[in-house]
Image (cartoon, rainbow, N blue to C red):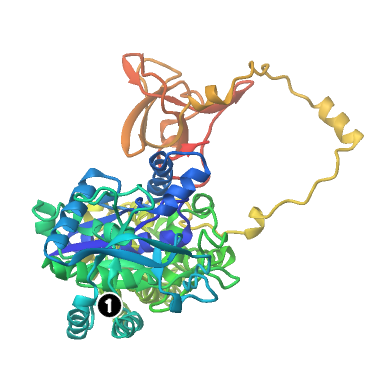
C-alpha cells in the first residue's frame, strides 16, 4: 500500500513558529505510523517562495529575494531536524524542476481554453496573496480574520483561469465523495462557498517580476496560488516521472483551516482541467491560539522561539503537546504553562513513572534480568484485551487524521498499567516464597508493556521509543506495528538497562527572570579576594569572525575504549549530524570508557584530522581542567547529535 502525504508549502518570509510546526509534526506522525505498518510512504513539505510579500520583505532588509529566502529556508529545515521530521522531499518553488512543470501546465490550460487573457480590477491583499471583491471587504480592509490589513486597488492586464466552468463538476464530486474534504465542518463551509458562485481566478501579475514567467508572454508572472498548488505534483515529476506514477494521487493534503479554500476549490479544479485524479482527502485542522485568544502567527507578533522551546523541554515533549491539544474540528490552545502541565502530568507522572517503577523492580527483584512469565491470570487477560482495544482505536483515529484522539486512547493503556502495578503489588509478592512465579509473571508483563507502549509511541515521540527500547533491552528489529498486537514476544534473560528519567518534572520557576541582585558588599568582596584561585592568563582577544570559524557541535558517544600502550588516550566513537566519527582524547586518567558511553558531549567539529598513535582523530572533545582535575563538557538536556553550539 502506498501513502503520499503533504503539508502546505510554507511562506519563508520569516522564521517558522510553533503554529507552523503543528502541521508538519502531525504529517510526520501519520507518515511514521504508515511506515511502521509497512506501507510505501512519501512525505512532502517545502516552501512557497514566488510571492510579492517575499519581495517586499527582502527589499525592506536590503537583500536580494533569493538570498533572503535561502536563509529562512535554512531555518525551516533546521527546525524540522530538531523536531525529528522525516520528510522524503523538500520542494522549493524557486527550483527549476517546479518552474518547468508550472510552465507546462499553464501552457496546456491556455491552449485548451481554460486560461484566457483579460483585464483585472479589484482589491488585493499582499500578506494573504489574495484578491477580494469590494463586497467581501470589511470596513475596506482584508476580510481574512487573521489579517484585517489594508488592501490595494489594482488594475492590470492578467490571465484568468475558468473556475466557473468547473463549479458544478466540483460540487458533484464533493457530494459523491463525502470524505474528500475533512473534517465535516470544513466540507460544509466549502460547499456553501461554491454554491455561492465561483468567479474566474486571476492567475498572472505584471506589476512585479519575481516568480515564474508565463512562457508565451514573459511580462506576466504566474500568480502564486496557481504556481504554489502545483508543487504537489511537480515534486513528483509530473507528468511522466516515476514518483508521480507511483504515488499520485495523494492520500491526504494536510493544512491549516485558513487555506482549505485554495486546496478544496482551486486545486481540484486545476486537476479536473488537466484530467488528473484528485487527492483522496483535503484535511484542514484548526489553529493554535495564544492564551489571549488570538491565532499564533507572525503577523500578530505572539510567536515563541521554537528552537528555545525545544532546548528547554525536548522535541518529544513539544511534539506530544502539539498533537495532544489539537482536537478534531476545533482550535488548540497554546501556552508554555499548559505545555509544562502536560509534560509533568502525562509524560513524567503517567508514562515516565510507570517505566521507571517497572524497571526499578526488575532490577531490584531479578537483578535486572527479565524473568520467564508464568501462567497469566484473569488480570493479565483483561490487560491484553484492553491493549488490543487501544491499538484498534489508535489505528482508527490515525486513519482519520486525528493524532489527539489516538493519544487519548493510547493513554488509557498507560493509565491501566500504572493501576496494574498497584494491583499486583510486586513489593508484597517479593516477600512471599510461594509467590515467586507470580512475581515473574508480573515483572515480565511490565517489560512487555514497555515494549508495546514504545511501539505505539513511535509515530508521536520517536526519541522516546529509542530510550524505552534501550532501557527494556530490545533492539530496533522489534519496532514493527504488528508486534504491538502480540504479547509474550520478549524471551527470558534479557537484561534491562535502567537509565535516567524519560521525562524529568519541570519547574517553571527555573525559567523565570531572576530578581535583580543587591550589590556585592565590601565584606563579600574581601572574601572573594581571600579565596581567589590563580588561573592561566586569558589569551589575547579575537574577533567574532575568528570565533565564527570554529564549528562546535553536540555529539553522542557511542563507544569508548583505551588506546593500547598508552595511559592517557581514549578512543571515542561518536555520532554527529547523523554520521560516525572517531576522536582520540587525552582523558583516560580521568574517565573510564564506560563513563562516557551514551553521554552528549561538545566537540570542535571542523578541526583538521590528525593521527595519534596510528588512529585518525576527527575533532576535539571539550573539557575543563584545573590543578589536576578534568571534566568533560556534557549536556544535561539531550539535544540531537549535530546541534550547533553557539
Q: Residue at x 41, y 76 (%)?
A: 327
At x 21%, y 71%, the residue is 269
Q: Is residue 453 above or below residue 499?
A: below
Residue 609 placement, left or right of 109: right
Q: Position of residue 315 (x, y in %)?
A: 44, 54
Q: Toward the viewer: 1 or 425?
A: 1
Question: Relative to the observer, which residue lies in front, 13 or 599?
Answer: 13
Q: In the rendered view, would you say 292 is above or below 7?
A: below
Q: Position of residue 7 (x, y in %)?
A: 31, 61
Residue matched to label 1: 181
- Side of 487 where 410 appears, left or right: right
- In the rendered image, the vertical position of residue 116 relative to residue 135, given as above or below: above
Identify the image quadrant of residue 620: top left
Nearest to the observer: residue 24 or residue 495: 24
Q: Quadrant of residue 9?
A: bottom left
Q: Of helix, strand and loop, which one carries label 1?
A: strand
Q: How many marks?
A: 1
Q: Quadrant of the N terminus?
A: bottom left
Q: Position of residue 546 (x, y in %)?
A: 53, 22
Amino acid at each position: 500500500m502506498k501513502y503520499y502525504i503533504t503539508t502546505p508549502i510554507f511562506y519563508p518570509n520569516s522564521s517558522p513558529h510553533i503554529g507552523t510546526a503543528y502541521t508538519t509534526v502531525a504529517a510526520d506522525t501519520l507518515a511514521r505510523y504508515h511506515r511502521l505498518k509497512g506501507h510505501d510512504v512519501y512525505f512532502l513539505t517545502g516552501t512557497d517562495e514566488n510571492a510579492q510579500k517575499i519581495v517586499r520583505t527582502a527589499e525592506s532588509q536590503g537583500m536580494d529575494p533569493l538570498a533572503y529566502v535561502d536563509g529562512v529556508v535554512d531555518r525551516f529545515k533546521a527546525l524540522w531536524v530538531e523536531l525529528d521530521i522525516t520528510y522524503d522531499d523538500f520542494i522549493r518553488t524557486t527550483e527549476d524542476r517546479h518552474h518547468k512543470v508550472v510552465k507546462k501546465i499553464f501552457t496546456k490550460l491556455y491552449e485548451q481554453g481554460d486560461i484566457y487573457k483579460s483585464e483585472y480590477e479589484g482589491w488585493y491583499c499582499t500578506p494573504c496573496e489574495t484578491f477580494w471583491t469590494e463586497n467581501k471587504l470589511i470596513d475596506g480592509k482584508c476580510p481574512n480574520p487573521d489579517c484585517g490589513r489594508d488592501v490595494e486597488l489594482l488594475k492590470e492586464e492578467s490571465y484568468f483561469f475558468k473556475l466557473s466552468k468547473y463549479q458544478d463538476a466540483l460540487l458533484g464530486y464533493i457530494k459523491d465523495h463525502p470524505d474528500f474534504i475533512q473534517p465535516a465542518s470544513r466540507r460544509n463551509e466549502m460547499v456553501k462557498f461554491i454554491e455561492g458562485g465561483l468567479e474566474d481566478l486571476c492567475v498572472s501579475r505584471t506589476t512585479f517580476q519575481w516568480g515564474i514567467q508565463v512562457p508565451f508572454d514573459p511580462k506576466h508572472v504566474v500568480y502564486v496560488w496557481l504556481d504554489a498548488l502545483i508543487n504537489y505534483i511537480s515534486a513528483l515529476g509530473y507528468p511522466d516521472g516515476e514518483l508521480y506514477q507511483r504515488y499520485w494521487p495523494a492520500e491526504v493534503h494536510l493544512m491549516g483551516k485558513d487555506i482549505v479554500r485554495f486546496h478544496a476549490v482551486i486545486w481540484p479544479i486545476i486537476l479536473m482541467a488537466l484530467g488528473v485524479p484528485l487527492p483522496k482527502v483535503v484535511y484542514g485542522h484548526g489553529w493554535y491560539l495564544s492564551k489571549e485568544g488570538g491565532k499564533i502567527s507572525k503577523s500578530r507578533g505572539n510567536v515563541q522561539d521554537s528552537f528555545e522551546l525545544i532546548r528547554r523541554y525536548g522535541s518529544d515533549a513539544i511534539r506530544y503537546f502539539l498533537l495532544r491539544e489539537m482536537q478534531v474540528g476545533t482550535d488548540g490552545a497554546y501556552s508554555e504553562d499548559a505545555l509544562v502541565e502536560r509534560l509533568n502530568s502525562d509524560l513524567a507522572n503517567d508514562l515516565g513513572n510507570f517505566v521507571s517503577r517497572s524497571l526499578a523492580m526488575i532490577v531490584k527483584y531479578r537483578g535486572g534480568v527479565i524473568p520467564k512469565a508464568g501462567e497469566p491470570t484473569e488480570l493479565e487477560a483483561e490487560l491484553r484485551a484492553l491493549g488490543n482495544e487501544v491499538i484498534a482505536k489508535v489505528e482508527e483515529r490515525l486513519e482519520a487524521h486525528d493524532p489527539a484522539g489516538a493519544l487519548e486512547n493510547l493513554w488509557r493503556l498507560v493509565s491501566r498499567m500504572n493501576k496494574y502495578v498497584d494491583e499486583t503489588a510486586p513489593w508484597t509478592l517479593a516477600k512471599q516464597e510461594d509467590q515467586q512465579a507470580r512475581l515473574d509473571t508480573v515483572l515480565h508483563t511490565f517489560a512487555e508493556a514497555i515494549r508495546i507502549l514504545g511501539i505505539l509511541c513511535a509515530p508521536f515521540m520517536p526519541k522516546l521509543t529509542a530510550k524505552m527500547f534501550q532501557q527494556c533491552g530490545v533492539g530496533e528489529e522489534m519496532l514493527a506495528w504488528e508486534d504491538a498486537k502480540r504479547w509474550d514476544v520478549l524471551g527470558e534473560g534479557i537484561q534491562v538497562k535502567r537509565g535516567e528519567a524519560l521525562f524529568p518534572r519541570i519547574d517553571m520557576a527555573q525559567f523565570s527572570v531572576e530578581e535583580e541582585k543587591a550589590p556585592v558588599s565590601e565584606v563579600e568582596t574581601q572574601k572573594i579576594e581571600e579565596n581567589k584561585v590563580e588561573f592561566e592568563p586569558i589569551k589575547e582577544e579575537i574577533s567574532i569572525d575568528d570565533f565564527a570559524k570554529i564549528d562546535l557541535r553536540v555529539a553522542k558517544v557511542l563507544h569508548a575504549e583505551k588506546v593500547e600502550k598508552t595511559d592517557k588516550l581514549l578512543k571515542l566513537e561518536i555520532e554527529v549530524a547523523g554520521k560516525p566519527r572517531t576522536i582520540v582524547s587525552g582523558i583516560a586518567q580521568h574517565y573510564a570508557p564506560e563513563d562516557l558511553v551514551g553521554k552528549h558531549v561538545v566537540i570542535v567539529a571542523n578541526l583538521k584530522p590528525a593521527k595519534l598513535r596510528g588512529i585518525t582523530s576527527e575533532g576535539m572533545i571539550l573539557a575543563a581542567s584545573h590543578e589536576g582535575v578534568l571534566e568533560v563538557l556534557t549536556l544535561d538536556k539531550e539535544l540531537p547529535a549535530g546541534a550547533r553550539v553557539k
